[in-house]
Image: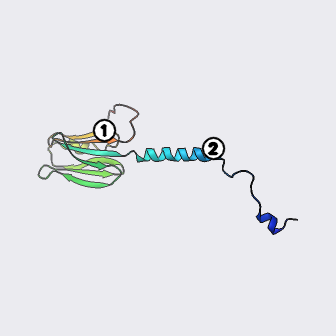
Amino acid sequence: MLSLASASCFRPTRPLVPVWDTVKMSLSLAASASLLAATCWAVVAVDGVETARYPLSQDLTVTIGTDRYNVLTISRGAAAVTEANCGDRTCVGTGAVSRAGESILCLPHRLSVRIEGGADPAFDAAVR
């Protein structure tokens, strides 16, 4: 019969988590953190000159311009021009962009919004 004193002194002879498993878990957590840290940016340019950079990780709405304006909305990791007073409103019809290399153009206002950063895309072109 075991006494309480002998039961409380039980020590396992080997660690509960092997050392190599701990190393593997640490490396996989570090790799996951580096993938999450790769931030995508919406880069706004007017007349070919960069005027602003906004992270896609932050939801916001920005009005670009005054009398000739475009409203840029960043939501859920994607950027879209949601309102504009240009004639054809093609920029609004483009929809949301979220991958590096994608862009939205408003030719009447000479505005471009392009996505930069993040992980390298698995392809070099997208056709819609």
Image quadrant of residue 4?
bottom right
Other-residue count near label 2 (Cα within 10 Å), few / some / many at <14 / 14–19 / ≥20: few
Q: Judging from the image, what secondary structure is the residue with disc 2 in?
A: helix
Q: CA distance from mark 2 to mark 1?
A: 42 Å
Q: Nearer the viewer, residue 110 or 38?
A: 38
Q: Nearer the viewer, residue 52 or 9?
A: 9
Q: Judging from the image, what secondary structure is the residue with disc 1 in?
A: loop
Name the residue rendered at 13%, 53% in the picture.
Answer: 66
Res 102 label: 1
Residue furthest to the left:
67
Left or right of residue 53, residue 7 in this image: right
Left or right of residue 120, residue 12 in this image: right
Q: Nearer the viewer, residue 52 or 7?
A: 7
Name the residue rendered at 53%, 44% in the picture.
Answer: 28
Residue furthest to the right:
1
Q: Nearer the viewer, residue 101 or 91?
A: 101
Q: Amino acid at mark 1?
A: Glu
Above or below, 3 relative to 24:
below
Colour approach in the figure: rainbow
Name the residue rendered at 30%, 38% in the picture.
Answer: 102
Left or right of residue 43, residue 48 in this image: left
Res 20 label: 2
**Where does residue 108 sit, x and y in percent of width and height?**
14, 41
Name the residue rendered at 84%, 67% in the picture.
Answer: 3
**Where does residue 93 sit, x and y in percent of width and height?**
25, 43
Quarter of the image with the C terminus is top left
Other-residue count near label 1 (Cα within 10 Å), few / some / many at <14 / 14–19 / ≥20: some
Quarter of the image with the N terminus is bottom right
**Where does residue 67 sit, x and y in percent of width and height?**
11, 52
Above or below, 123 relative to 24:
above
Q: Earlier in the sequence, mark 2 or mark 1?
A: 2
Q: Amino acid at mark 2?
A: Trp
